[in-house]
Image: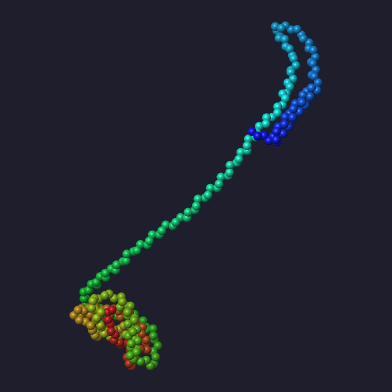
């Protein structure tokens, strides 16, 4: 083991210090005055059988042992602190992958349902009597002004025909289907209307388009025409054309056909 000069010098200084300390203690103890002897004690003779002889003697002075120099030992090498643990890397972040959406299912195309053929109704006899117009309201027509010089010419006649057809069409749409071939039947109707537009009478003056196949539907078409005009009465027509020297809608013929 190698000892450097610094350690030798320190060891020698410690030894000299201890020798000096021992010499100082020795000199101090030599200069201390001796302890005086205790005075003579009177001894009384007592029966030895009853009391034992007790001798008292001074206690010896205990001299402290000289101090010993501390042992010099090599200091253990300093422990090297272990390096701090490396930080544990955080686990990589994994974003959840969205689940794929299911592909839309294709709905089967609905097949069109076959339209059942309409049954041909049995021909029936007209049940409307001559008083089918009984109970109809007699509301006045909206147009009451009557100009002095009104002419019922071809243009005025076409305007009246179009107004009547537009007003009775909703009532005709509510009628049931009569049968195949009934749409070929055409009726010429004579209408008698009051100034308020109320239907006073309706007569069939001509039937066209009937044959052996659809002749049985003629009474049904007549009944339908009467119901249509009765339900849509009164009609709203211009009052100035009700009656003129050239005619008017007070007495007018109309053509009716099943739609």
Residue 69 falls in which quadrant of the image?
top right
Residue 121 falls in which quadrant of the image?
bottom left
Residue 135 seen anywhere in this rendered image of the structure: no
Location of residue 129 with respect to 20 vertically, above or below: below
Residue 247 screen position, x and y as percent: 32, 91
For residue 235, side relative to residue 78 (left or right): left
Residue 26 seen anywhere in this rendered image of the structure: yes
Residue 158 screen position, x and y as percent: 33, 87
Position of the N terminus, as image quadrant, is top right
Q: Residue at x 36, y 81 (%)?
A: 139
Q: Nearer the viewer, residue 70 or 192?
A: 70
In the rendered view, how is the structure colored? rainbow
For residue 100, side relative to residue 47 (left or right): left
Give the tally of numbered discs.
0
Q: Residue at x 31, y 66 (%)?
A: 110
Q: Nearer the viewer, residue 212 or 150?
A: 212
Location of residue 221 with respect to 248 vertically, above or below: above
Q: Nearer the viewer, residue 212 or 115?
A: 115
Residue 170 falls in which quadrant of the image?
bottom left
Residue 82 screen position, x and y as percent: 58, 42
Location of residue 72 with respect to 208 vertically, above or below: above
Q: Residue at x 50, y 52 (%)?
A: 92
Residue sitting at the far left: 212
Position of the C terminus, as image quadrant, is bottom left
Q: Residue at x 70, y 7 (%)?
A: 50
Q: Nearer the viewer, residue 80 or 147?
A: 80
Residue 91 screen position, x and y as percent: 50, 50
For residue 152, side relative to residue 32 (left or right): left
């Amino acid at each position: 083991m190698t000892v450097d000069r610094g350690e030798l010098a320190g060891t020698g200084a410690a030894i000299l210090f201890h020798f000096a300390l021992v010499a100082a203690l020795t000199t101090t103890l030599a200069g201390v005055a001796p302890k005086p002897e205790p005075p003579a004690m009177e001894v009384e003779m007592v029966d030895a059988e009853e009391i034992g002889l007790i001798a008292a003697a001074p206690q010896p002075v205990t001299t402290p042992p000289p101090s010993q120099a501390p042992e010099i030992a090599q200091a253990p090498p300093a422990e090297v602190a272990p390096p701090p643990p490396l930080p544990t890397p955080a686990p990589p972040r994994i974003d959840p992958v969205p689940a794929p959406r299911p592909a839309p299912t294709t709905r089967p195309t609905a097949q069109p349902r076959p339209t059942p053929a309409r049954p041909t109704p049995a021909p029936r006899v007209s049940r409307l009597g001559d008083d089918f117009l009984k109970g109809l309201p007699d509301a006045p027509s909206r147009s009451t002004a009557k100009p002095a010089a009104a002419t019922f010419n071809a243009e005025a006649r076409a305007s009246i025909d179009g107004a009547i057809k537009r007003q009775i069409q909703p009532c005709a749409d509510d009628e049931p289907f009569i049968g195949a071939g009934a749409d070929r039947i055409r009726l010429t109707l004579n209408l008698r209307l009051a100034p308020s537009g109320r239907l006073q009478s309706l007569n069939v003056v001509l039937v066209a388009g009937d044959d052996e196949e659809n002749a049985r539907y003629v009474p049904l078409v007549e009944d339908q025409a009467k119901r249509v005009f009765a339900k849509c009465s009164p009609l709203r027509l211009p009052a100035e054309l009700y009656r003129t020297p050239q005619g008017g809608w007070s007495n007018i013929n109309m053509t009716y056909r099943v739609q």
